[in-house]
């Protein structure tokens, strides 16, 4: 009679440990890719909003003020209600927190847009005027902790 060769307990444990290590690497890379994708979307969203703000500036010779003066709506859509002109049909939202930060002075001579990235490796914000950009906004991370924003876009004539 032929005897069947079976696996020993150590061999089975070794295979299970190797599979566990591989699964850990795969899932960590997967979650890292998700974070990078959300960060790329945030950067793209801010760039789209920047383009709409520049179109608004071309028409009004001022950037919109955050308190809604001059018929400015910055919610579901970005529109000039006085002239029935829509600059963005749907304003994008942050994939995690749901909002981006917009800041402008009362005269509308400059603006700043802020976003918090999940990838904290990028510590310097992108701006069109980096020497005058100071990111002073805070977001909440997934654990509810306050995190200083590390990405922003500003108008070319941003004041410090």
Image (cartoon, helix red, strand yellow):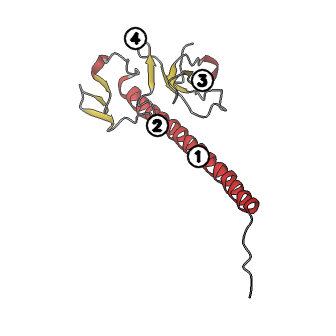
Instruction: Count residues near mark 4 (Cα–Cα under 10 Å), then give few for <14, some for 14-19, many for 20+.
Output: some
Q: Measure the C-alpha gap from mark 4 to mark 1.
A: 40 Å
Mark seen at residue 45: 2
Mark toward the viewer: 3 or 2: 2
Residue 29 lies, in percent from the top left, at: 63, 48
Question: Disc 1 or 2, which lies upstream in sequence?
Answer: 1
Which is nearer the N-term, disc 2 or disc 4? 2
Q: Name the residue under label 3.
A: 129
Closer to the chain start, of discs 3 and 4, is: 4
Q: Which of marks 4 and 1 is in front?
A: 1
Q: How many angstroms separate mark 2 from mark 4 (CA)?
A: 24 Å
**What residue sits right under mark 4 in the picture?**
106
Residue at image point 34% right, 15% down: 67
**Residue located beneath label 1 in the image:** 33
Question: Which callout, 3 or 1, points at the residue further toward the start of the chain?
Answer: 1
Write down the quadrant of residue 35 in the picture.
top right
């Amino acid at each position: 009679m032929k005897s069947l060769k079976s696996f020993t307990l150590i061999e089975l444990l070794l295979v299970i440990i190797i599979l566990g290590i591989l699964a850990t690497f795969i899932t960590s890379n997967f979650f890292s890719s998700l974070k990078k994708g959300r960060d790329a979307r945030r950067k793209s969203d801010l760039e789209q909003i920047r383009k709409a703000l520049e179109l608004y500036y071309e028409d009004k010779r001022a950037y919109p003020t955050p308190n809604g003066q001059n018929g400015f709506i910055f919610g579901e859509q970005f529109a000039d209600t006085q002239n029935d002109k829509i600059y963005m049909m749907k304003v994008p939202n942050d994939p995690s927190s749901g909002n981006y930060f917009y800041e402008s002075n009362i005269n509308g001579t400059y603006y700043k847009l802020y976003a918090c990235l999940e990838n904290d490796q990028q510590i310097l914000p992108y701006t069109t005027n980096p020497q005058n950009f100071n990111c002073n906004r805070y977001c909440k991370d997934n654990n509810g902790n306050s995190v200083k924003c590390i990405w922003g876009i500003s108008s070319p004539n941003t004041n410090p």
